[in-house]
Image (cartoon, rainbow, N blue to C red):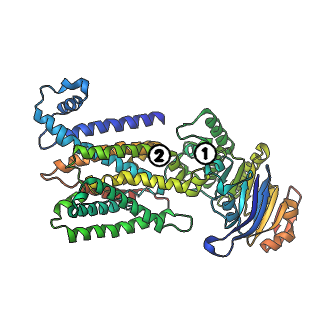
Amino acid sequence: MIEVEGLTFSYNGGAPVLEKVDLSVKKGEMLGILGPNGSGKSTLIKLVSGALAPDRGQVLLDGKDISRTKRREIARKLAVVPQETDLVFDFTVREVVSMGRYPHLGRFQFDDPHSKKILEGAMGITGVVRFADKPFSKLSGGEKQRAIIARALAQEPKVLLLDEPTKNLDVRHSLDIMSMVRKMNRENGLTVIVVVHDLDLAARFCSRIILLKNGKINKDGPIDRVLTPENIEQVFDVRSRVHRDVGMRIEIID
Amino acid sequence: MKDRMLLAFGGFLLLLIMALILGVSIGTVGIPLIDVVRIIIARIPVLGSLDEGIPSSSSTIVMELRLPVVLMALFVGAGLSSSGAAMQGLFKNPLVDPFIIGISAGGAFGWVIGLLLGDHFGFMSGYLVRIVLSFLFGMGTVTAAYMLSKTGSQIPLTNLLLAGVALSASITAATQLAIYIFVENPTPLIFSLLGSCSNSKWSEVWTVGPVVMAGVVLLSFFGRELNAFSTGEEGAKHLGVEVERMKIIILGLGTLIAAITIPFCGMIGFVGLMIPHMVRRLIGPDHRFLIPGSALLGASFLILCDLFSRTVLDITIPLGIVTGLIGGAFFLYLLRARRFSS
């Protein structure tokens, strides 16, 4: 689905933020990207989505180099949910979600029945129907994230990239958002790549984890093999205990 | 929502027709509203006999003096307002208009340069030269602002605004210097720079009108892209918008329909700021409707401003002063009343 080859990137010619990163993501995976601050997690997401252009290396989406692909074509396969979204004008939630149909609609095509169905589905799954007619800018952080995820789903993507989607949310909303994404991953085969700052959240919802350290992939594999006390200490410099009583839980000791 | 939209657009159209008739009717010589309607409708070939019994002097006043002025105000108002709506959408900043990002200052400079060239070289005295120079300098200013604010592959929009403001200040100073040095009797020129439609002729209306109309229609077609810009450039890119190309198209069109008005009517500020605000209040922020809606309301607004400017005192007040007074107050009101999200 996504092949990342030899990706190297630095901001304005400074020290490289990412160095020779190789990564292959298969259809239906839910990949969590973990790492300390400044390890290059968000930059990796920005490169995979094509928001930034790499200094060297390439990103292939369905075998096609994204830097040579039209944005419309990319947007029909890949959607992005940023850490947070602000809107200047008072668009309603419904209007914001409808923007997700942009890559599918012709210039003179107004919302067709298929789009209507997709929009209703996207708003239903994410639970935004209730406040669909409220202005987006009046929503709480969690509601905004739901609406933006609904907009991403309206693009009918095969891959969903999320950059710390729960960064500004409380525990309850974080769990809700992550389990919603996991559900779409399990039930609809949506491929998910998500940057997570919380080890526990990653352990609960991801099927595969990569650990980034200093712009390089330090570990890559299934959660139980990557999230070990040794690896966590090496990457995050904290001691921890891993409990496997109900699913997997990570307890930080210091 | 649909009903509300229809109602609003119906209202805009009705207001425009009323403004048009009032604008033509009122003046040094008053002409009854019904006569105005009859004289104008009589221009439609089949209905040629409708103006029978109306003094031919009224006909001349309406057709040769007032109608071109009113239509010019209509197109200038439409051009500036829809340009403002598009720029506000592109820059995600409700305080932007063609005046603020330097189009007006650049365009005025080009116009004055064109006038001076025309004075010295007879072959350059046609106003096509002035239009072209005005557009080129307007576009040049925006492009310079764009280049100056570019950092790497990104063009942060706040940088663009600051660059626009700074460039406007310098270019306006240059314009004033040019006038101070080269123009012997600057009063008429300064009056025209302050903004006025009062000397408009049919040939000028036929130049500005089609360009503005085409610009408004084209900009409205890019309404979806402008909507996508509201969550940021990166957001627009992820929705499938070719962001850099779209910025150039929208800036180009927005500049064209604002700059074309300058050689004919001078610098008329704040219309492009105020009107989109009002229209957004009425029909919401969707640019597919905001742009044509702003064109319609802006047209009525400027016709009424022009009417006010030539009837309230014995002399004609420059139009730019009227819009400046209203716009300045509006700007202050926005600063106080609006809750800005940064």
Expressed as whole percent of the image width and height from the top left, the position of residue A22 reads 78, 63
Q: Which residue is painted at 69% across and 59% down in the image?
A: A48
Asked whether the beta carbons under mark 1 and mark 2 sit within 8 Å of each other, the answer is no
How far apart are the two marked residues, 1 and 2, measured between alpha carbons?
17 Å
Q: Which residue is painted at 49% across and 46% down in the image?
A: B222
Check the residue under mark 1 and report the chain it is in.
A
Residue indicated by mark 2:
B287
Q: Is residue B17 left or right of residue A152?
A: left
Check the residue under mark 2 and report the chain it is in.
B
Q: Quadrant of residue B45?
A: top left
Expressed as whole percent of the image width and height from the top left, the position of residue A28 reads 79, 49
Q: Is residue B274 visible?
A: no
Classify 10 Å Cα crowding around label 1: few (below 14), some (14-19), many (20 and above): many
- Tell me the amino acid under the disc marked 2: His
Classify 10 Å Cα crowding around label 2: few (below 14), some (14-19), many (20 and above): many
Tally of numbered tags = 2
SS for callout 1: helix
SS for callout 2: helix
Expressed as whole percent of the image width and height from the top left, the position of residue B91 reads 47, 57
Expressed as whole percent of the image width and height from the top left, the position of residue A66 reads 67, 55
Image: A72 above or below A50: above
- Tell me the amino acid under the disc marked 1: Pro
Residue situated in front as seen by the camera: A174 or B228: B228
Q: Nearer the viewer, mark 1 or mark 2?
A: 1
Residue indicated by mark 1:
A103
Q: Which residue is painted at 84% across and 69% down in the image?
A: A231
Q: Quadrant of residue B39?
A: top left
Q: Is residue A240 visible?
A: yes
Image: B48 above or below A250: above
Q: Which residue is painted at 53% across and 41% down in the image?
A: A107
Q: Is residue B270 left or right of residue B159?
A: left
As drawn, the label of residue B215 is none
